[in-house]
Each structure stands twice: as structure tokens, then as C-alpha cells.
Image (tube, grey):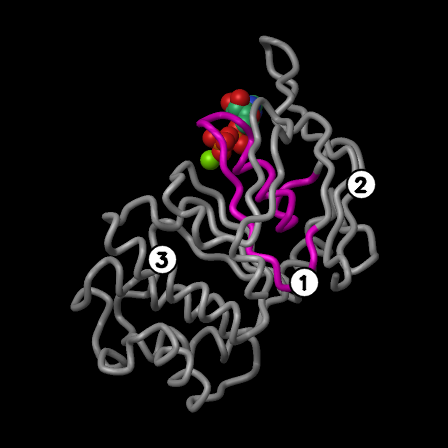
Amino acid sequence: MSNALLRMDNLQRHYETPAGVVKALDGVSFEIHEGERVILLGPSGSGKTTLLNCLSALDSPTGGSYRFLGEEVPRNQSEKMTSFRRDNIGYVFQFFNLLQDLTVLENILLIQELAGKKDTARAKELLKLVGLQAEINRFPGEISGGQQQRVAIARSIAKRPTLLLGDELTGNLDTETSNKVMEALVSACKQENITSVFVTHDEGLVKYATRVIRIDSGKIVADQSTSADEEA
Ligand SMILES: Nc1ncnc2c1ncn2[C@@H]1O[C@H](COP(=O)(O)OP(=O)(O)O)[C@@H](O)[C@H]1O
Ligand SMILES: [Mg+2]
């Protein structure tokens, strides 16, 4: 087995509320290895978004340990958390968040420029990888929702993140479009050797994962490798 990319030990995220303590994460432990494609499944309110926000260092756990490439991930220090995210994390949003006044290609180029690595050839290659070579000069308003989400995927991997995260990223797409988006995502992650964790409540996405982790009431209740592992 390859090296552990990250490891959580007894991770907790408690909220103090007037009604008492909410244990959004209540002792979560797992390792994720390079190249895994994890789907995180659970009912509404089970802690999926909280876990994703801790993985990306958008949020700080209130207890336990989170190590990434062997080092404890910064918490409660916004600048260090921002640099951790910038150096390691890619994110695909449910609502795409593309800039409407820029073409498909320009949306990718902008992200590369912000990272100080403009590379038009690579931007075009990424768009080809998600099946959008014919749409590079269109504006987001001129392509479908599924195509916009594939642009967002190309954008999220443009900076070569180590770990790619998504929260209900097919939440607003029909089943056929979701499948196309997930296929584009899997081929992009394989090609770029990106490890991924995607949150969903859609059991239909399990077939795209190498591993399925189920969470309920802030605790992991199942953690299984799936058959997709065999090709890895
Ligand atoms: N800012 C907050 N303050 C208090 N409770 C919160 C807050 N954010 C989330 N929670 C609670 O934490 C639990 C997990 O929420 P969340 O991670 O959003 O679940 P999911 O994404 O699985 O629907 C829920 O009970 C939710 O109400
Ligand atoms: Mg959620």
C-alpha cells in the first residue's frame, strides 16, 4: 500500500450552543492513502460538511489530531490555514462558481495566474481531459450545468492539488449529467494522480469510488474498499 497522505485520530468538532454542546464530529479516525478516491456518505446533519471543512483546514477541530504528509495541520491560525489550503487543497463547489464574464478557457487561465503559473497549453489539455475542447471560447452562460461543472473540475485541478474535495458537487445535476461529471472527475484524478474525497448522500456515486466511508451522528459507522480498488 502507498504512503498515508493524511491521518485523523479521534478528531472532534464540538459546537457550544445555547441548547448545549453539538458534537458535529465525535471521535473520527482514519487514514487516506495517495491515489484513493473516497466517497463520504451520510444522512443530512451527520457531519459530512464539517468533516470536509476540517480536512481542508477551512474549519478548526476542537479535539484530536489531523496530520497531513506527517505534519499536524494548522488550526485556529487563519494565515497558516490559508497557506495549507493553497499548497495542498483543490475544491469543487456545488454551484460551480465560475466567473461569468470570462470564457471557459479564461476561467482556467485566471486560476493559473493567481497561482503564478500561467500555462495555456496545460489549460487546454485539462479542458480536453474533461471533454470540453470544443467549448473553450464560450462563456459559462452559453454551456449546460454539467459542462459548467466540468469546467469547475478542470479549474480545481489546474493548480495540481494533492487532495481534491467536493461537497455534493453533483447535487444540482440530473443522474445522466452526474455520471458524465463523475467520469470526467475520475479520469482527471487518475491522470493527475490526485487523491479525492467527495461528500454526497447519493448512493449512485459509490461506483466511482475506491473506498466508501459512512458517517452518522459525527461517527464513522462503516469504512469499506470497493471493487474499483482492483484497477488501482
Ligand atoms: N455553526 C454551527 N453551530 C452549531 N451547530 C452546527 C454548526 N454547523 C453545523 N452544526 C451541526 O453539526 C451537525 C453536522 O452538520 P453538517 O456537518 O453540516 O452535516 P451534513 O453536512 O452531514 O448535513 C448538525 O447537527 C449541524 O446542525
Ligand atoms: Mg452538508
Q: Earlier in the sequence, mark 3 or mark 1?
A: 1
- Front disc: 3 or 1: 1
- Can you identify the residue that label 3 sits on? 97
Q: Are marks 2 and 1 in contact (CB under 8 Å)?
A: no
**Is 36 drawn above or below residue 119 in the view shown?**
above
| Residue drawn where x is 58% and y is 58% of the image | 229
Task: Name the amino acid type tagged 2.
Answer: Ser
| Residue drawn where x is 62% and y is 51% of the image | 56
* Left or right relative to 93: residue 15: right
Q: Which mark is residue 34?
A: 1
The image shows residue 160 at horizontal and vertical percentages of 57, 73
Task: Name the amino acid type tagged 3.
Answer: Asn
- Can you identify the residue that label 2 sits on? 65
Q: CA distance from mark 3 to mark 2?
A: 32 Å
**Is 36 drawn above or below residue 40 in the view shown?**
below
The image shows residue 225 at horizontal and vertical percentages of 60, 48
Q: CA distance from mark 2 to mark 1?
A: 19 Å
